[in-house]
Amino acid sequence: MTTTQRSLSWIAAFAVFICAVLLFESILLPFLVGLAVAYFLDPVCDRLEQMGCSRTIATSLVTAGFFLLVILLFAILVPVLYKQLVQFAAQLPDLAARIEAKARPLLESFADLKANNQAGIQEFLKDSLAGTAKVLGKVGSKVVSGLGALANAAALLIVTPVVAVYLLRDWDLIVRKVDGWLPRAHQETIREQCRLIDQTLAGFVRGQFSVCMLLGIFYAIGLTALGLPFGAIVGLATGLLSFIPYVGMLAGFAVGLGLAIANFDSVTDIGLVIAVFVIGQLIEGNFLTPKLVGDRVNLHAVWILFALMAGGALFGFVGILLAVPVAAVLGVMVRFGLAQYLDSALYGSTPPADPEDTGKRDDA
């Protein structure tokens, strides 16, 4: 097979992948979640096998423990978070009015505006806050409706555990079967790239998940201790959304600051809320991310942000789930292609000598 044929084969395979996602998007979610669960629980099953358990027993113990833990967390957290979310939605108009009342004098003092411009400022603030509230309301309604659809989808609740159990039980068999399909001439090269993809994906997702959980707990405890209304839900949401670089923190900071301005009269209290977010970012940037994620994943924050936004725009929630794995695969393939180019004659060859210059040197 020539290089052109191989390139066309890879392009065709990628096109088939995109078409399959578009065609089966509505039913892919439980299978993707089950695949993700099996992928991240496989090391635990391998460890139990080394301790003497059979694969079937290890799979049963690990999946049962995992799903019981998930159910327990949902049973504890969901009622509290749902109550705060409903209260926040009910108080949103009042919060917007209070923020407007406090922000108007501040803007007037900074801009040094005359009294005849106060009506324009008030109208501007009302329009801005109304637009913000409308956007938040639409986003919230979509999120709530999406969560309701997920909660009511029997496929997600039934199919996901079944898929996870069967994939986890047969994971090593599947890997060996796929390994047997690899072309003999390029077997070691493909294996090495797959190991790099696995290292990148596991290192990023597992590490980033730990970072998000720790940040969410820190923000929730810090904001609640300061007496910020809805501090728990704002803190947890900020932490969980931190897997989207910059966006999660900025969104949580904006909501937290707005709640602080609306509910606190003291500048010190507002400053303490800001300090919680600043400290959280310092902890993340200097301790959590370097220790738990590190530089070994080779996924730049801008590339991750682009992948998440592109996946969400193209395929919705399914695209968000696929974004990081696809980004990891493409990143490894691009680095491999660049390394091949740098080692090739195309990069290292010198320009051919000019025949006229050669003749002149020979005459001399």
Image (cartoon, rainbow, N blue to C red):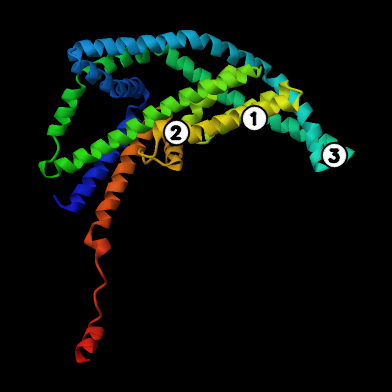
Q: Secondary structure at mark 3?
A: helix
Residue at 63%, 29% in the rendered image: 275
Location of mark 3 (residue):
117
Image x and y of residue 260, in percent: 69, 24
Decide which of tag 1 and tag 2 comes sooner along the chain: 1
Query: Mark 2 sits on what residue?
Result: 289
Q: Nearer the viewer, residue 179 or 16?
A: 179
Q: Earlier in the sequence, mark 2 or mark 3?
A: 3
Q: Is residue 57 above or below residue 185?
A: above
Res 95 quadrant in image: top right
Spatial CA distance of label 1 from label 2 is 21 Å
* Amino acid type, callout 3: Asn
Disc 2, SS: helix
Which is more foreground, mark 1 or mark 3?
Answer: 1
Q: Going 56% across and 23% down the picture, which residue do you hit? A: 219
Which tag is nearer the camera, tag 2 or tag 3?
2
Residue projecting furthest to the right? 115
Question: What is the three-letter code of the residue carrying label 2?
Answer: Thr
Residue pictured at 19% horizontal, 38% vertical: 191
The x, y position of residue 7, in whole percent, is 23, 48
Using residue 274 as the reference point, say whether residue 283 is left or right of it.
left
Q: Which mark is residue 274?
A: 1
Q: CA distance from mark 1 to mark 3?
A: 31 Å
Q: What element does badge 1 sit on? A: helix
The Cα atoms of the two marked residues, 2 and 3, are separated by 48 Å
Residue 133 shows in this picture: no
Quarter of the view holding residue 233: top right
Q: Quadrant of residue 228?
A: top right
Q: Earlier in the sequence, mark 1 or mark 3?
A: 3
Locate the C terminus by quadrant.
bottom left
